[in-house]
C-alpha cells in the first residue's frame, strides 16, 4: 500500500511504499507542516449598531495583511455581518463567548483590540471618518476603504423575493432600533414624512416604491411599506435588489456601500464627513436659521435620537432646497 507524508520543509506530500502490509490501510508516519498561525490571534471586539458593524468590515483586509501570521477572531454585536468574510477565522456574538478565555487568551499569543472610535478626538471634532478613526486605533493606513459584505449562494438568492413588476425604489424614511427609542421620529436622521410623500409623487409612476421604516412611524399610502424587523440578510438582499435607493444616515447606507450600490443619502443632523461614503450622492442640509440652544449636548451636537426641542428647522424647505434636490434625485 501507499501512504503520504509531509515534513516541515516539503512543499508537497510524498508517497511512501510498504510491501508488507495487507488488509486495511495503516498509517505509518505523517509529519504535519507546522501551522505558523497556531495559537496566534487578533481579537477585535466591535459593539454598537448594525451600520457600525458593517463599517468595520472596511478594515478587515488591511488588518489581515498587517497581521498575516495571526488568525482574526471577531466578537461583535452583529456577528452575521462577518460570518462569510474570507479574512475572519471565528465570529462570536457579544455576551455569548463560552470558553473564550481558555481558547484565545490563556497561554495564547493574542492581540486584543476593544476601542470606541466614536470617542476619539477626530470623530468628536468631525475631522475624521468613522473608519479612519478606527484605522488609527488599529494602526492601519486609511485609504478611504469601503465596507465589504459577503453573502453565500443561498443568501444571494434572497434578492429574488423582492422582484416586482417595476424597478424597485427603496425609500428609507426612518432608521434605528425597532425597540427602545423614545420617539417615532428623529429629526437628526429620519426623513420628514412630508418630504417622503413629495419624493413618492415624483417616482410612483416609474418605480415600485418600497418604504423602509420601523414600527410606530407614519406609513405612506399607496406604496409597499416595511415596518417590521427582518433578518439582516433579508435586509441586505432588499438593498441588493433595489435599482434606485434614497436613504438617510443609517445602517442601510453602510450596507449599500458594502454591496457597491450607489445611493442618494439625505443628511440632516449628522455629516457624511463622519459616516458617509464618496460613492454615494450625499445631500447636506441648508444651514439652520435662528439660534436653537443645544442644552443637552455634551461631546456631540445633536444626538442620534433627535431631542425634539433642539430641532432648528420649521419645515422641510428650510432643510433642503427642493428644486435642487429634485435635480439631484433625477441624476442619481
Image: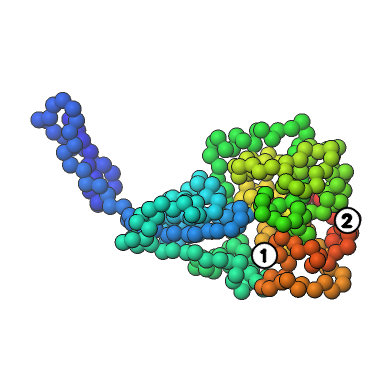
**Image spot of residue 302 (x, y percent):** 73, 67
Disc 2: CA contacts within 10 A as few (<14), some (14-19) or many (>=20): some
Viewer-proximal residue, 262 or 236? 236
Viewer-proximal residue, 156 or 43? 43
Apparent side of residue 315 relative to residue 263 in the rendered image (left or right): right
Q: Residue at x 48, y 59 (%)?
A: 44
User: Is residue 23 among the parts visible in the rendering?
Assistant: yes
Q: Secondary structure at mark 2?
A: helix
Q: Quadrant of the N terminus?
A: top left
Q: Secondary structure at mark 1?
A: helix
**Residue 316 sits in which quadrant?**
bottom right
Check the image and report above or below for 11 versus 268. above
Apparent side of residue 167 relative to residue 229 in the rendered image (left or right): right
Q: Residue at x 48, y 48 (%)?
A: 86
Q: Which residue is mark 2?
A: 322
Which tag, 1 or 2, sits closer to the chain's start?
Answer: 1
Apparent side of residue 163 relative to residue 137 in the rendered image (left or right): right
**Image spot of residue 317 (x, y percent):** 89, 59
**Image spot of residue 144 (x, y percent):** 61, 61
Disc 1: CA contacts within 10 A as few (<14), some (14-19) or many (>=20): many
**Image spot of residue 142 (x, y percent):** 57, 65
Q: Residue at x 75, y 62 (%)?
A: 306
Tell me the distance, in whole angstroms, between the alpha carbons under discs 1 and 2: 24 Å
Q: Which residue is mark 1?
A: 274
User: Is residue 58 among the parts visible in the rendering?
Assistant: no
Identify the residue at the far left of this view. 20
Apparent side of residue 159 relative to residue 308 in the rendered image (left or right): left
Q: Residue at x 83, y 50 (%)?
A: 193
Viewer-proximal residue, 146 or 99? 99
Amino acid at each position: 500500500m501507499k501512504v503520504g507524508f509531509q515534513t516541515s520543509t516539503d512543499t508537497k506530500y510524498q508517497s511512501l511504499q510498504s510491501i508488507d502490509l495487507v488488509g486495511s490501510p495503516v498509517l505509518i508516519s505523517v509529519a504535519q507542516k507546522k501551522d505558523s498561525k497556531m495559537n496566534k490571534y487578533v481579537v477585535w471586539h466591535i459593539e454598537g449598531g448594525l451600520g457600525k458593524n458593517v463599517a468595520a468590515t472596511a478594515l478587515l483586509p488591511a488588518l489581515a495583511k498587517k497581521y498575516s501570521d495571526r488568525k482574526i477572531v471577531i466578537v461583535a454585536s452583529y456577528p452575521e455581518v462577518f460570518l462569510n468574510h474570507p479574512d475572519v477565522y471565528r465570529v462570536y456574538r457579544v455576551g455569548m463567548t463560552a470558553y473564550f478565555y481558555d481558547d484565545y487568551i490563556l497561554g495564547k499569543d493574542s492581540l486584543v483590540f476593544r476601542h470606541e472610535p466614536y470617542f476619539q478626538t477626530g470623530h468628536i471634532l468631525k475631522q475624521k471618518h468613522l473608519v479612519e478613526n478606527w484605522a488609527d486605533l488599529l494602526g492601519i493606513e486609511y485609504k478611504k476603504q469601503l465596507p465589504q459584505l459577503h453573502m453565500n449562494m443561498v443568501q444571494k438568492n434572497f434578492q429574488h423575493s423582492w422582484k416586482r413588476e417595476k424597478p424597485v425604489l427603496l425609500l428609507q424614511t426612518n432608521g434605528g432600533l425597532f425597540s427602545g427609542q423614545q420617539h417615532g421620529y428623529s429629526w437628526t436622521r429620519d426623513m420628514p414624512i412630508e418630504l417622503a410623500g413629495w419624493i413618492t409623487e415624483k417616482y410612483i409612476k416609474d418605480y415600485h416604491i418600497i418604504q423602509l421604516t420601523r414600527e410606530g412611524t407614519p406609513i405612506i399610502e399607496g406604496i409597499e411599506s416595511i415596518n417590521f424587523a427582518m433578518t439582516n440578510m433579508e435586509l441586505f438582499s432588499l438593498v441588493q435588489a433595489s435599482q434606485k435607493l434614497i436613504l438617510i444616515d443609517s445602517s442601510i447606507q453602510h450596507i449599500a456601500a458594502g454591496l457597491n450600490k450607489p445611493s442618494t443619502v439625505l443628511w440632516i443632523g449628522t455629516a457624511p464627513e463622519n459616516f458617509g461614503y464618496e460613492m454615494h450622492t450625499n445631500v447636506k442640509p441648508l444651514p439652520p436659521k435662528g439660534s436653537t440652544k443645544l442644552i443637552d449636548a455634551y461631546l456631540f451636537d445633536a444626538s442620534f435620537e433627535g431631542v425634539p426641542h433642539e430641532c432648528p428647522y420649521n419645515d422641510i424647505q428650510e432643510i433642503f432646497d427642493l428644486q435642487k434636490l429634485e435635480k439631484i434625485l433625477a441624476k442619481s
